[in-house]
Amino acid sequence: MSNEVEKVKCLIIGSGPAGYTAAIYAARADLNPVMYTGLVMGGQLTQTTEVDNFPGYPKGVQGVELMEDLRAQAERFGTDIRFGIISAVDFSKRPFTVTTDDNKVIQAETVIISTGATAKWLGIESEQRYNGHGVSACATCDGFFYRGMDVAVVGGGDTAAEEATYLSNLCKKVYLIVRRDELRASKAMQARVFNTPNIEVLWNHVTEEIVGDDKFVTGVRLKNVKTDEVKTIDVQGFFVAIGHHPNTELFVNQIDLDEQGYIKTVPGSTRTNIEGVFAAGDVQDEIYRQAITAAGTGCMAAIEAERWLASMKYGK
Ligand code: NDP
């Protein structure tokens, strides 16, 4: 435990594609960035298998390997990467005060928040057992592997409707498992679902178990909550699309969040309502949620931090 106060120009919280890209740009701009990785070093992509849609990897890349490459690139330019957690922030005055979970106090001139979001899961054991082996929380990332196969999507919101429609172009058949007798998705998205012949909506159904051969998913056992009837459908892919929650608990009452908890940024930028604090990646993006869009906003955040520091020094 140490009470010494460390001063940094640019503190990056979170180590997904947004954080590492911000670090690469901030380090190359001589901001001497310090990154706190959070518990899951490398973020959501370390929980997935093959990544085929990140530009620059024509043969695809494992999520873990991609994040190791990004980390190595950030380190190459001198980013100080620390495995640790930020436990408190005070954005009420500058420099901003940030406390780590081992009670180290840091004063930061700028902060880039890239703490990401976490997919919500159903919470059944088989879901984690087959994660990456038939179970996924991202159709855009993994749908390609299920071309010509039968798959199921669980959820009734815009994400589920969008993922089901996306998968309908790749897969033979898509079941949309909905726990009520209506969709929460917007009318436009609902119309797309209803007008797609190879999507079948299974109303009033909940998932009891994902079944498989111990290696891959082979089906899903469902229960009709109205009739108690239990049946198993044969699918090779199971997509969970019941929402995400942004990792912003740390920032409640410190920064403006929207009603779902995402950090509000000025459109077309990564600026937040606190001058000198920037947000990049899924923590401020409920729409795209892609590694490449996160990396793009990470780049924007570093450039904006650098320009903001320059404007503080030399005037706007
Ligand atoms: P939502 O919270 O809107 O919807 C979640 C859905 O999952 C609901 O239908 C909910 O059912 C269902 N659900 C939740 N928990 C379970 C469970 N345990 N078992 C079965 N079903 C469950 O999340 P989304 O990710 O769909 O959307 C989040 C936000 O992002 C929304 O504002 C949405 O409009 C927006 N968005 C916009 C897009 C676009 O504009 N293109 C694309 C994607 C998202 P129930 O209805 O019964 O609660």
Image (spheres, helix red, strand yellow):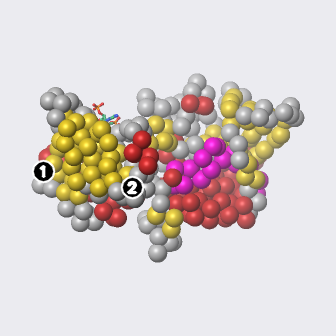
Q: Is residue 168 visible?
A: no
Q: Could you tell me the amino acid type at mark 1?
A: Asn
Q: Is residue 203 magenta?
A: no
Q: Could you tell me the amino acid type at mark 2?
A: Asp
Residue at 15% x, 56% y is 198
Q: Is residue 39 magenta?
A: yes
Sequence-wise first label, 1 or 2? 1
Q: Along the horizontal axis of the image, is 121 left or right of 1?
A: left
Residue at 55% x, 34% y is 248
Numbered tag placed on residue 195 in the rendering: 1
Q: Along the horizontal axis of the image, is 126 left or right of 69?
A: left
Q: Point out the stretch of residues depicted in magenta.
A: 30-46
Up/down of 2 relative to 170, above or below: above
* Inter-mark Cα distance, 1 to 2: 35 Å
| Furthest residue in direction bottom, as rendered | 58
Q: Position of residue 108 (x, y in %)?
A: 75, 40
User: Which element is circle 1 on?
Assistant: loop
| Furthest residue in direction top, as rendered | 253
Residue placed under numbered mark 2 in the picture = 214
Q: Position of residue 285 (x, y in %)?
A: 46, 44
Q: Nearer the viewer, mark 1 or mark 2?
A: 2
**CB under 8 Å between callouts 1 and 2?**
no
Q: Residues within 10 Å of mark 1 (few under 14, many from 20)?
A: few
Q: Is residue 145 visible?
A: yes
